[in-house]
Amino acid sequence: MTGRFLAILIVVSALLAGAGMYYLQVYAYYEPVVATGTDDVQLTPLQGDRPETILYEDFQAIDANSSPIRYRACFTTPSAPGVLADTYAPYPGAAPRVAPGWFDCFDAEAIGALLRSGQARAFLGERNLEYGIDRVVAVTEDGHGYVWHEVNDCGDKAYDGSPLDPTCPDRP
């Protein structure tokens, strides 16, 4: 009788711990980002390092203070990716991060497929938004846009302990 009780207690405890971890990873830390309406979507020009706001509508975003790469956003824009490419810096090798399933507008796999097929282009939103973290903006041919954060080369080296190259800015 005691063995059965202990086995049930262990199984119930494991189920509760698993459910708690799932909730914490998928729901607990994320919060909606309040749109300013004026500077939520910015790109870095080819000539310069200060991001500029582009035209956008229907902005929605989520973020979490538990990690600098949890930011995700969606928007629409009348600006075509080809026109933006004439003015703003590309972001080669962009790979969207998976968003929680409940944030419906951001499908990382679909965005990645659009980038690979050339139906979307990725641009540098802001370099070193936080040390080693870049904001990336992708715009599709049909006017949908997506924003996420990626760890850049300096961040990779800083976080794994490798020596930083001279091109990396000083750590704060």
Image (cartoon, rainbow, N blue to C red):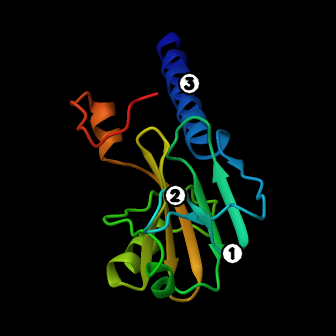
Amino acid type for the residue under numbered disc 3: Ser
Q: Is residue 43 above or below residue 121?
A: above
Residue 156 percent location from the top left of the image: 30, 40
Q: Earlier in the sequence, mark 2 or mark 3?
A: 3
Q: Earlier in the sequence, mark 3 or mark 1?
A: 3
Name the residue at 51% across, 15% down.
Answer: 6
Residue 53 percent location from the top left of the image: 64, 67
Marks 2 and 3: which is nearer the front?
2
Q: Which residue is tagged 1? A: 56
111 on left or right of 16: left
| Classed neighbour count for the residue bearing mark 2: other residues with Cα under 10 Å, few (<14), some (14–19), many (≥20) | many
In the picture as drawn, the residue positioned furthest to the top comes out as 2
Name the residue at 64% across, 80% down.
Answer: 77
125 on left or right of 151: right
> Which residue occupies the foreground of this view, 60 or 48?
48
Report the disc number at residue 2.
none
Q: Which residue is tagged 2? A: 148
Q: Which residue is tagged 3? A: 13
Amino acid type for the residue under numbered disc 1: Tyr
| Classed neighbour count for the residue bearing mark 3: other residues with Cα under 10 Å, few (<14), some (14–19), many (≥20) | few
| Classed neighbour count for the residue bearing mark 1: other residues with Cα under 10 Å, few (<14), some (14–19), many (≥20) | many
| Disc 2/disc 3 C-alpha distance (Å) | 36 Å
